[in-house]
Amino acid sequence: MKIILATSNAHKFAEVKKILKNFELYPLEEFLTPFEIKENGMSFKENALIKSKAVFNAISKEKQKKIVVLSDDSGLCVEALGAQPGIYSARFSKQGTDEKNREKLIKKLRKLKLSQSKAYYKTAIALSSIWGDFCVQATMHGKVICKERGSGGFGYDCLFIPNHFDKTLAELSSEEKNSISHRFKALDLAQILLRILARNYG
Ligand code: ITT
């Protein structure tokens, strides 16, 4: 059984590949020419399933017999901002770059005269297969601060301090992040499904 990771985000691909080291994982481009998928769901779960189903349905029936498509929809929810940016995390700012998204987040918190806020990351992992579609979700709680710290990770990591830590995710090693993250916890659950699917695929 081959797993295609339906993402255009290279950072996500690298994290998922490290966490799912016991599975055969391939980037989307090895099987298909990447195409635009409208993420118009109202939740992480809906968007993750939209992505995995769109890619699975684009694969030929013959190839589908050997393939599971895995997608990740994730984002940061900030308590003081009413859970924004949430499902819009990747396109929070007009430009949609990690840097501009962080700038907008800091600006919004400063406008509220806050230097930090409780926050959580959420990931929905969806699997599409000949045995059906599945989705599991997980969170990582902590706080966001208004000053960037560290150079690891991606996205909002240099602003996010997980509970029980005094470093941002960007100051932790990738192994440390991958042992506590929303993505790790969701993939830990997804592995149960993947092992069952691998047995069923034969
Ligand atoms: P794909 O849809 O192609 O997978 P994307 O980057 O558009 O790529 P999402 O729609 O799921 O993916 O948005 C995820 C955004 O949430 C991402 O761009 C970051 O801004 C943020 N994010 C998610 N997980 C993160 C993490 O572990 N560390 C930092 N930021 C994260």
Image: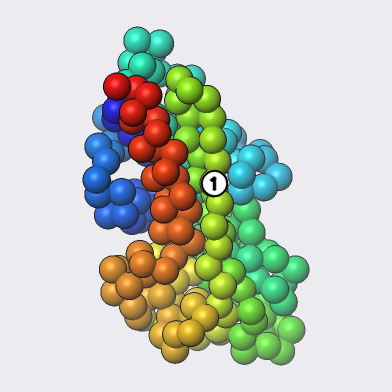
The residue sitting at the top extreme is 62
Q: Quick check: 179 above or below 70?
A: below
Does the image show residue 148?
A: no
Q: Position of residue 173 (x, y in %)?
A: 29, 74
Q: Quick one: 105 or 170, which is closer to the camera?
A: 170
Q: Quick check: 52 above or below 83?
A: above
Q: Position of residue 41 (x, y in %)?
A: 67, 40
Q: Quadrant of residue 143?
A: bottom right
Q: Quadrant of residue 26?
A: top left
Placement of the N terminus among the 4 image quadrants: top left
Q: Residue at x 72, y 77 (%)?
A: 80
Placement of the C terminus among the 4 image quadrants: top left
Q: Quick check: 188 above or below 24?
A: below
Q: Secondary structure at mark 1?
A: strand
Other-residue count near label 1 (Cα within 10 Å), few / some / many at <14 / 14–19 / ≥20: some
Q: Position of residue 160 (x, y in %)?
A: 50, 76
Name the residue type under label 1: Val
Residue bearing mark 1: 136
Q: Quick one: 110 or 17, which is closer to the camera?
A: 17
Does the image show residue 110?
A: yes
Q: Position of residue 36 (x, y in %)?
A: 50, 32
Q: Quadrant of residue 22?
A: top left
